[in-house]
Image: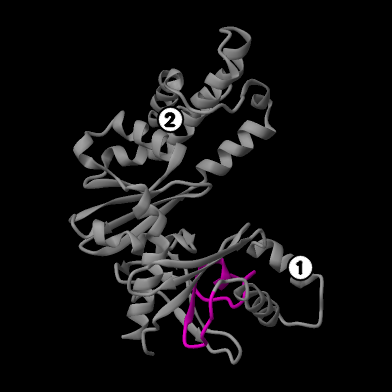
Amino acid sequence: MKLPEKFISCDWGTTNFRLRLIETTTLKILSEHTTDMGIKKCFSEFKEQSHLSQNQFFEAYLKEQIKNLDGTISNDYVIVASGMLSSSIGMHELEYANMPLAFNGKDLISKYIPFDDMPDLLLVSGAKTNADVMRGEEVQAIGLSAELSKYDKGVLLLPGTHCKHIAFEANVFKDFTTFMTGELFDTISKHTILSASLSSAPWNESFKDMFLKGVEKGLADQQMQSLFSIRANTLINQVSDEQNFYFLSGLMIGGELAGLKNKKGTIFLAASGIYNILYKLALESFLPAERIVCFEEQTLEQALLTGQQQILQTYAE
């Protein structure tokens, strides 16, 4: 396959949909279109009808949304889609590629799907170990691999609802672990007795000590015996709900990061906004600064595009 002058990046997640028209060599974003039609919602709507197959239903939606991109869309372009579109509730299910994975993405499973009336689709699989799976984060990791390749070994952290820790060595992603940190935090803070003692607030330095106290408990594997202390803090010690909120955050993040205490190599943090602030504080509480690398915002914003570009190049070779 000849490398196209432009490609369409399809970022179709569980809850959101995004298309971007990209200049292949420079990764310049020429046009962008987003909707709230995530994979989960689209699959639900597919199940409510009977005249189109699953492939046809997703294809029809994709074709309709491409019309919203500015400029002429040539059929010589290629749609590069990673993540949930290759899942069982997506357009076409692909098996997970087995770890380890080379930095250039050549070990991922891909399927080229030709279309008559829109650009062809390059669908990319997720990755798995014997005990874990991911779809989408592996492409972001590939997009960050140029920086990772400067180091012999390390661990890439991708915070979020389901946080990924991806271990690498000698330009190969060797293993990964998923932590349900974000989802558990959301569940505890909204659907347990502790919800009455927790209140979200914008971050400021006054929360730092309480957050780090939570991190310390989490790093010491004391989450279970520390959770109800949040309720006691409200009733006995008059600790504010906002302080408790950041204590719980520290407790969960500390528990997630505890396994890194005995890891060798550099820790790479790929996070923006509040995630970057909190995870960086937590890491600095037990690791020397020279072992922590935080990616810049611009690098993170382009990580998915860089990964998709690399996969497209590898496929075209």
Name the quadrant containing residue 193.
top right
> Of 176 and 70, which appears nearest the observer?
70
- Residue 61 lies left or right of residue 277; in this view the side is right
Give the percent coordinates (x, y) of residue 85.
57, 70
Residue holding disc 2: 218
Q: How is the image coloured?
A: one colour
In reply to whether residue 34 is colored magenta, the answer given is: no
Name the quadrant containing residue 231.
top right
SS for callout 1: helix
Give the percent coordinates (x, y) of residue 83.
51, 66
* Image mark for residue 45: 1
Q: Is residue 90 visible?
A: yes
Q: Tell me which label, 2 or 1, sits earlier in the chain.
A: 1
Residue 293 vs 216, above or below: the answer is: below
Give the percent coordinates (x, y) of residue 181.
51, 41
Please tell me which residue is depicted at 32% across the width and 59% down the height of the picture: 144
Residue 239 vs 123, above or below: the answer is: above
Q: Amino acid at mark 1?
A: Glu
Majority secondary structure in the magenta region: loop
Q: Which residues are magenta?
A: 71-95
SS for callout 2: helix
Q: Amino acid at mark 2?
A: Gly
Residue 29 vs 311, above or below: the answer is: above
Q: Is residue 11 visible?
A: no
Residue 252 vs 104, above or below: the answer is: above
Please tell me which residue is depicted at 40% across the width and 45% down the height of the picture: 271
Q: Are marks 2 and 1 in contact (CB under 8 Å)?
A: no
Q: Residues within 10 Å of mark 1 (few under 14, many from 20)?
A: few
- Residue 84 lies left or right of residue 38; in this view the side is left
